[in-house]
Amino acid sequence: MTSSTIDHLRVAIVGAGPAGIYAGNILAHSVRDAGGSVAIDLFESLPAPYGLIRYGVAPDHPRIKGIVNSLHEMLDAGTIRFLGNVEIGRDIALDELQERYDAVILATGAIRDAALDIPGIDLPGSFGAADFVAWFDGHPDVPTEWALDGAEVAVIGNGNVALDVARILAKHAEDLRSTEIADNVLAGLEASAVTDVHVFGRRGPADIKFTPIELRELGEVPNVDIVVHDEDFAHVDASTAATNQLKVMLRILESWRTRERSGASRRLHLHFYHSPVEVLGADRVEGLRFERTEPTGDGGVRGTGEFRELPVQQVYRAVGYHGTPVVDAPFDEARGVIPNVEGRVTVPTPGLYATGWIKRGPVGLIGHTKSDAMETIAHLVADAIGGRLTAPAVEGDVLDLLEERDVAYTTWDGWLALDAHERELGASHRHTRERVKVVPRDEQVEVSRTGALIGS
């Protein structure tokens, strides 16, 4: 490597969600444009790629999952080597990566639920939305069973995750059969006792964080009535909405106010100006206590001193995500991110970078992730050209180390085998489906490494 060009780089990326894949793709093109070459290894703790696109998007949202097609093309191009089922800090240490690569990019995302610090939040029957989403998306590291044994359920939050959770809770299992939903999840939803799902937002209808398509789809769920309350619209004037997107959503909400209920077997209630103050119950969740709020006129809300209680048997908090530390990497616990300056992690050593939600926090959509990766990669390439990276101290292929430690890593060819296997399961299902997800980790690894389950 010279001071003005790039000869050859070896780069490790940790995390095979959109952030990591975009970073690898942009890096490959950027180094090529600079006249150099790069070998990129993409490490993922799960056996399969795509991160929250596979394990964080509701199964009834195939349009959103369409992003997988472009991510597939990036990995299938052969410029990025996928290494799944490898956990940094367990199978290989961060400093061992840094010894073997010119640079390491952390793209581990944010998969934990943000905290909601109110009394009773830890009662049995109170859950984080991220855990429930992981369950209904067939994540291998969560329990396969989820008891939906209460008739009345509360969802706290006014974003798209809250809406996904509420929709899946309210939706009838038969309306999910055609999706890629895992069999154990379908069975759990078929046994659901839920009749009423209540979604609570601390602010008003004009402050919702949904998207129009998400909100509109909510009103199209079969055999589910949408319930909104006139008192929540006293301060709402759709004509003064700040964006056309918000105007559309307010019109949707307004149409639901005047729509007659159909007598559906399930109901989804949208409540605004409700700030949760306590989860009620002795041994498990029995209800929620709220303080009614009102707008302050400057974009905020304040408590009115009026308190209300609602009997519910389960509570799901969807108040945001929080980053998970990477072993031996610096971490800002308060913000849930790896401290960085535009993607450069300044400590402990040069050559460490971050991108995606672990860099900036859990905000923004897929498009933001791509532009975020461009910023990080621009700095990495500049550091390489400027001679600020330390050459690898250890030669040889990292696969030698993984095999020496008997790490059952998976590869891109392994993912193609698992992908084909899941699609075959879907095609052979008595209700034809696009795919049926394989949930257990050991089965995913077995399919990926051998092409088929032993004994299948």
Image: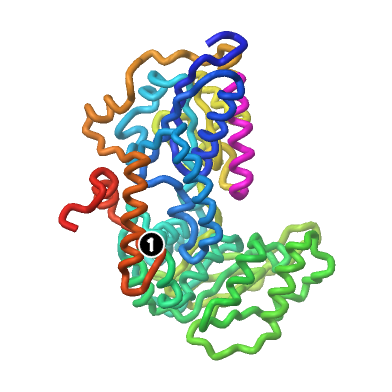
Position of 185 with respect to 233 (left or right) is left
Position of 4 with respect to 39 (left or right) is right
- Residue identifier under label 1: 435
Please report the residue visible at 61 percent of the width from the left and 80 percent of the height from the top. 227
Residue placed furthest toward the left: 455
Q: Where is residue 168 drawn, in percent x and y?
A: 47, 69
For label 1, count other residues whose C-alpha is less than 10 Å away and answer few (under 14), some (14-19) or many (20+): many
In the rendered image, the vertical position of residue 191 relative to residue 52, given as above or below: below
Which quarter of the figure is the C terminus placed in? bottom left
In the rendered image, the vertical position of residue 287 relative to residue 156, given as above or below: below
Asked whether 12 falls inside the magenta stretch, the response is no
* Front-most of residues 98 and 84: 84
* Residues shaded magenta: 364-382
* Front-most of residues 104 and 427: 427
Please report the residue visible at 49 percent of the width from the left and 23 percent of the height from the top. 38
Q: Where is residue 158 drawn, in percent x and y?
A: 61, 63
Q: Can residue 303 be seen from the camera position used here? A: yes
Identify residue type, mark 1: Arg
Please report the residue visible at 58 percent of the width from the left and 22 percent of the height from the top. 381
Please report the residue visible at 28 percent of the width from the left and 54 percent of the height from the top. 440
Q: Quarter-wise, where is residue 455 in the image?
A: bottom left
Secondary structure mostly seen in magenta is helix
* Front-most of residues 117 and 150: 150
Asked whether 367 falls inside the magenta stretch, the response is yes
In the rendered image, the vertical position of residue 98 relative to residue 216, given as above or below: above
Q: Can residue 117 be seen from the camera position used here? A: no
Q: Where is residue 454 drawn, in percent x and y?
A: 17, 52
Q: Quarter-wise, where is residue 405 in the image?
A: top left
Q: Where is residue 333 drawn, in percent x and y?
A: 50, 39
